[in-house]
Amino acid sequence: MHDNQRPQDGRQRSGPYPYDRPPHGRQPRRPSSHRRRKRASAGRLGLAGAVAGAVGIAAIAAGIVLLRPDSGSGGPATEPSLASEGGVGVQIASVPAPKAGAPLNVTTPEGYGYSLAAIRAGTDRQPLGATQAPPSGTTYAYADYVLTNTQRRPVLLDFPADLFMPKDRVPASAQERCMPQAGIPDDMCTLPNHSKVTGRIDGAGPPVEDGGDTMIPAGASYIVRIASDLPVEDGASSGDLRLYVWNARFTSDRKGIGLAFP
């Protein structure tokens, strides 16, 4: 500051004009209270809008998380659902332990362990419920056996036993479909067939669906019925029918192992 701009009382000016006064005696303009109120209101509205927007985005994101199906990566495992060979949710009755023959223990390459014990065999026109009636003079063959998970963990629901009958008890129309197997007597063959769990022994837990596989709970025992899809002659009797385990998945020496009926 030049000396001729210093006030007489020695005070240092603080404003933009000499002696703290604007030129020509005008006062500096200050924002009016009305303008301040408008700015304050606008600020509050902006903040409220931002908060509302953030809440809306969070709600939409939460909805997406809830509605989006689990991708299976890093999320909790889906609870297994009840299942059986009859379909998911089909009820399987609890039954007492039946009289059965000597058990046979088998283990798969994956380490699944099973015990099998034959119960009975026979013929029936409808061995597994609603089935197309066989031609006159024929019937269907079936056998029941106990299937047990011998391990302390769930194992795959599998059916190791196969049903065999004498070739001379198979109608001529099905002879080509009755297949012999290595390690089984030459006069025996197996027709196309399917198996189904028909009972849970002593209240055993039902099969469960887990990741697309049907599993037997640890220690559970079931009654399994295997029935032929093609008919046999009416003259076939329970004494003609046999259960064998022959698949290399369950026996390593490629020799059929018979299950003895009680």
Image (cartoon, grey):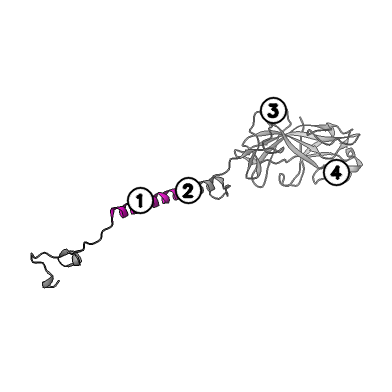
Check contact, mark 3 vs mark 1: CB within 8 A: no
Q: Earlier in the sequence, mark 1 or mark 4?
A: 1
- Residue 115: where, in percent of width, then height? 68, 37
Q: CA distance from mark 3 to mark 4?
A: 34 Å
Q: Earlier in the sequence, mark 3 or mark 1?
A: 1
Q: Any magenta on residue 54?
A: yes
How dense is the environment of label 1, judged by Cα within 10 Å: few (below 14), some, or many (20 and up)?
few
Check contact, mark 4 vs mark 2: CB within 8 A: no
Give the magenta range.
32-59
Q: Where's the N terminus, which quadrant?
A: bottom left
Closer-to-camera residue (176/117): 176
Q: CA distance from mark 2 to mark 3?
A: 60 Å
How dense is the environment of label 2, judged by Cα within 10 Å: few (below 14), some, or many (20 and up)?
few
Q: Earlier in the sequence, mark 3 or mark 4?
A: 3
- Under tag 4, what secondary structure? loop
Our reading of the magenta stretch's main secondary structure is helix
Q: Which residue is mark 3?
A: 97
Q: Specify whether 189 is left or right of 59.
A: right
Q: Which residue is mark 4?
A: 186
Please name the residue shown 37% across and 53% down the image. Answer: 42
User: Any mark on residue 56, and which?
Assistant: 2
Q: Specify whether 245 is left or right of 208.
A: right
Q: Which residue is mark 1?
A: 41
How dense is the environment of label 4, judged by Cα within 10 Å: few (below 14), some, or many (20 and up)?
few
